[in-house]
Structures are given as structure tokens and as C-alpha cells.
Image (cartoon, grey):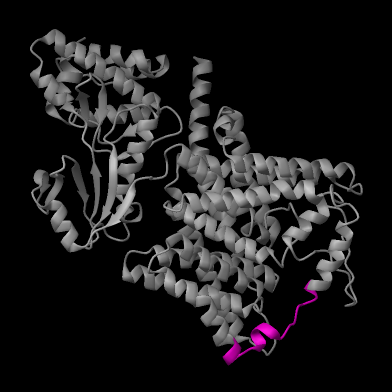
Amino acid sequence: MFPSSLHNAGNRFFDFVCLWLLPAGMLALLGALFFLPERSLHHKLYYGLFSIPTLLALCVRPRELKTLFREPLLWLFVAFAGYAILSLSWSPSPAQADNLIKRPLHTLMLFLGTGLMLRYRPEALKGLFLGAALLALLATLRDLTTFMLTYTPGSRLIGAGALDNPLLSSHLYGFFGTYWLWMAVNGKRALTVSLCMAAFAVMFAAVVATGSRTPLVAMTLAVNWIALLCLDRRSIPLFLAAPLFIVAVLVVDPQLIMARGDSYRFDIWRITWDLFLQHPLIGHGYDAPLSIDVGVGYLLSEPHSFVMGVLYYVGILGLLPWLGMIVYALYSGWKYRTHPALQMASALLVFGIGAGLTEGGGILSRPKEHWFLLWIPLALVAGLNIARRGGRLVAANRARLSEAQARQLHEGARVIEEDGLGPKVLLLQDGSFLKLFRPRAWYTAGAFYPYARRFARNSQQLALEGIPTPPVVELLNYADGTQGVRYIPLAGQTVRQALQACPSLAERRALVQRMGRFMGRLHQQGVYFRSLHLGNVLLMDNGEFGLIDLADMRLLPSPLSAELRQRNLRHMQRYTEDKQWLFEENVQALLEGYSAAASQTMSHALRQKLELAPGAER
């Protein structure tokens, strides 16, 4: 029993890391800089809540690496980081080489941890980013208020918390400003769009108050990228926004752009380029010292360009995988632009590319503001690609219906199921089914992560796991906020109907045994179907079992725990006929079938703890 208990404990630990600890770590990574007194605490939060848990989870389940490394972005990063570490052999001997090697490893954990989190809990991303963006918004309002109350001519907004530089602060303001703009463009309600645009205005005002011009260029690029991804009538004001803003600034206050000249950027780049030409192929080495004298009385240590930094430190050989990461991530964002999350991640990356044109330089660092420009967006794209391949991102077409289109769609439909508020399931004239989900209050989980999307995602994921489900044709958004899922029904009858029609006790027992085997398979594959009962399991015409009514379901990283299995069966005991057939007349057949598919330990625990009803078969 000991190896089995250890295995189950490992599964529970892996699930806890993927479903809870990594989301908490990501939230801390995104939002903590605004409130922590120093960056070192930010580093420790990331290491403790994200990097180290990711490493431990992969030690518990190393086979996950095979799935994660199907993503090309991970291979490109490993090539880049591996070459950077190799370059230590010809760079000036660093005092702490082991510390330098830890940096790319922690960055690799960002990619791997994001992949694990989005593979097993992709729905958390929306809440994480909204929570971090709200924290950033509150902190920015605080910073802007303090700045206005203490403003003196020539001063620049720095920000509180661990922020200690106006330029670095502008990276975070611009990052979350890009997020709020994306939210506004994808908003479906006028109130949501208005609130998101107000939040964007606050973040944009903070960028302007920092006096940094590069984030303005970066946000312009991000705005146009979002417009290209949408490419509808909403794109027109986005394409016009940047030139109109530039014209307005030149008319009202041209000093906002022109006052600080080129800030010695061209001199810095020229000197860095000359140094790069000394070792163009292999570079000077990761973390080689860089001293740039532009005649201002002190030496500069950054090339103020990510590209120039990569060329200086690791040369052309290091630049190739670095550029490969960016190009592939942009390609993914464009190719899969129908996925909203990939839209967001690629827009954040475009902002980072724009900001990195004239800022930054260190190629691998501890978690800090520069991570928001490159590593966090790249890790998001990699994680979303991993989730997409695993069927965790909804791939169904989305359509918005006007009232006239909705009436036309419903014309001639037969009501299959309804409640006091109206139809819930319709059989349309083309033979497809339409399941309707009415709008929920804004503060509920159903509004935040709509049940229609859950239905479509669960259908895709179960199909990849080899469990038959109704194929989803499209998702529909109605004018009143109702959402619908149109799907092709499976041919067959519910198990409840099949048991009612069984002509003999022996056939009913055989069917219950097969049902038990199917339930064991679901539990072993991590499928927790909260609404599991015999009316939601279909016995198809080909003899296989399938699932319907898929919205109320979770797909966990590991086989279900004994507690969840028992809870699932207790739910089935609430239905009188189900309880009689499964847990009284044929309980031994149920357990025999269950044991054939589930692990011996879980089958034994279920047999021991299942409360048999009076008169149950012994």
C-alpha cells in the first residue's frame, strides 16, 4: 500500500501546484511590484510561488515534459539560454557563475509553469489578468494622485512600491494599458467597454506622466496590432488613434516629444555596434561588462535596446533563436487570432517589442520590469499554444446574433427542454441542437467564465481523451446577453432509458457493469462530472457510452481522489431510479465494472466506503 499511497500523494501535490499554487504565483508576479518595498521580495515571491513549485511538480511527474516540449517556443528558449550559458566560457570570468546560470533556469520555469497552468486550468488566466490589472489600476491611481499633489515643473512620475525609475515604471503602466485596451475592444457590453476605456485612460496618463516616449511608440504598435487582429469596423478608430494623438501633442505641447532630444540613443547604439563588431558571431559572452561613454560624465552599462544587447552579449548565433522566439510567437498570435487569450498575449508581446527597441539590454535577468516586455508575453503565448494543442482553448466559431437573426434561427424549432423562464434546449430544423444559457449576474462565475464556453471546451477536451461527446458547431451570442451552443446530437438513448427497456435482470446487470467500467474510466482520466447521472450518459447506437450536458464539469490533471469519486457517486444516489438500479439491485456488478477500469486502491476504497442502501445486493 505504501507505493500506492505515495503515488496518490504525488497526484494531489501535482494537482495543487497546477490548479492553485501556480495561479497564485502568476498573480504575484504580475501585480506585486506595485506594492512591495523592494525587488528582492518580488524575486522571492516568484521563486517560492512559481519557479520552485514548477520544478517540484515536474519532478513528481516528469512525463509532462514530453507534452510541454512539443511547443517550439520552449526549444527556441532552451537554445537561446543554453548558448548564453555556454558563452560564459569565453566571457570575462564572473564572480558568481552559478548565480548567472540560475537566471535562465528560473526563466525556463516561467515557460514550463505557465504551460502547466494553462494546460490544466486555462480558465484561470482571465481572472488572473483581470485581478492583476485591477491591482495595477488601483496602484496607478494612487501614484497619479501623489504625483499631481506634489508636482513640480520637470518632475516625472516614478511610482511607489518596488518601482524606482520612471522609465521602468512606464513599462508596467504600458503593459496593463495594453491589456485594458484589448479588453475594451473585446467587450460585448457598452458598460464593460466604457469601464475598460476609462482604465486604459488612467494607465495611458501614467505613461505620459513618466515622461518616457518609448512606451508611447510601443502602445501605438500594440493598438495597430489589435486592430489588425480584429479587422472590422472597430479597427477604424484604432488605426486613427495614434496619428490623431501625435497631431494633438504637436499642436498642444510639442515639448512632450521633442524636449529631451534623442537622449544619446544614437551615440549609445553606435558605440555598442562597434563593440559588437569585435566578436560578431559569438558575442562577448553572457554578462560581459559593458561600459559606454557618451561624454555625460559617467559610464552607461546598458545598450538601451534589447536587440543590441543580444548582439553584444551572444552575437549572431544567440540572436537567431532569440528572433525565432519573437517571430514564432507573433505568427501564433496571428494564426490563432480567433482565440481571445492569444490575441491578448500577442498584443502584450508587440508592446514589449516596441518598448524594447530603445530600452533594456540585459538578455537574462531576475524577475523585474523587463520581464513584462519579453519573457511574460512569450511564456503566455507558449502556454496558450500548449493548452490549444490539448483542446483546452475553445476552437468553435463565435457568432453574434441580432434579434432578427435569432428569430430566424428559432423558426420551426422544437422545444426539447424548458423551465419557467423559457426554452433551454431546442431541436433546430437542420437537425442540430441549440442549448441556451441565460445571462448571469456580473459577479457570478457564470458571467465571468460563460457556461457556453465551458460546454464547448469540455466537448473538445473529452473528444481528445477518446470520450464521445456532441460535436460543437458554433457558439452564439444573443443581443440580450443569452449565450447558446449549437451542436450535433449523438445517436442513442440515455442509460436510464436503456435500463428501463432491458427485458431481463441479466441484461440490466450486464449494462450496469459496463456503466461501472465507464465511470471508472472517467475517474481515472480526471473527469469530474458534477451532474453525473444516468440521464446525462448516453448509450450510443454503436454500443459505446457518451456524455451530454457538459457545462458542469472539471477536467483535473490527475485521476480523481477517493473523496471526489465518492461525492460523484453520492450525487447519483439522489435519483430514485438510478439509486435502485446501481446501488441496490446491481451494486456488485457496478463495482466489478468499476474495478476493471479504475486503480485497485481506489476501487477498494470505494467498495469499503460506499454506503449500500437497505436491501442492496451483498
Between residues 548 and 486, which one lies in front from this camera angle? 486
Residue 15 vertical placement versus 146 (above, below) = above
Between residues 359 and 172, which one lies in front from this camera angle? 359
Q: Residue at x 49, y 57 (%)?
A: 344
Q: Residue at x 58, y 61 (%)?
A: 350
Residue 123 in the magenta stretch? The answer is: no
Is residue 136 visible in this depiction of the protein? no
Between residues 286 and 368, which one lies in front from this camera angle? 286
Which part of the image, by quadrant, shows the C terminus? top left
Q: Residue at x 28, y 21 (%)?
A: 610
Residue 49 position in % (x across, y down): 59, 46
Q: Is residue 241 left or right of residue 293?
A: left
Residue 148 position in % (x across, y down): 58, 85
Marks counted in the figure total: 0
Q: Is residue 395 left or right of residue 360?
A: left
Residue 172 vertical placement versus 548 (above, below) = below
What's drawn in magenta, residue-wise?
Answer: 250-265
Residue 247: quarter of image: bottom right
Q: Is residue 239 left or right of residue 315?
A: left
Residue 544 vertical placement versus 107 (above, below) = above
Is residue 22 visible in this depiction of the protein? yes
Residue 260 in the magenta stretch? The answer is: yes
Q: Residue at x 23, y 45 (%)?
A: 486
Residue 392: quarter of image: top left
Between residues 29 and 301, which one lies in front from this camera angle? 301
Residue 519 position in % (x across, y down): 30, 23
Residue 501 position in % (x across, y down): 8, 19
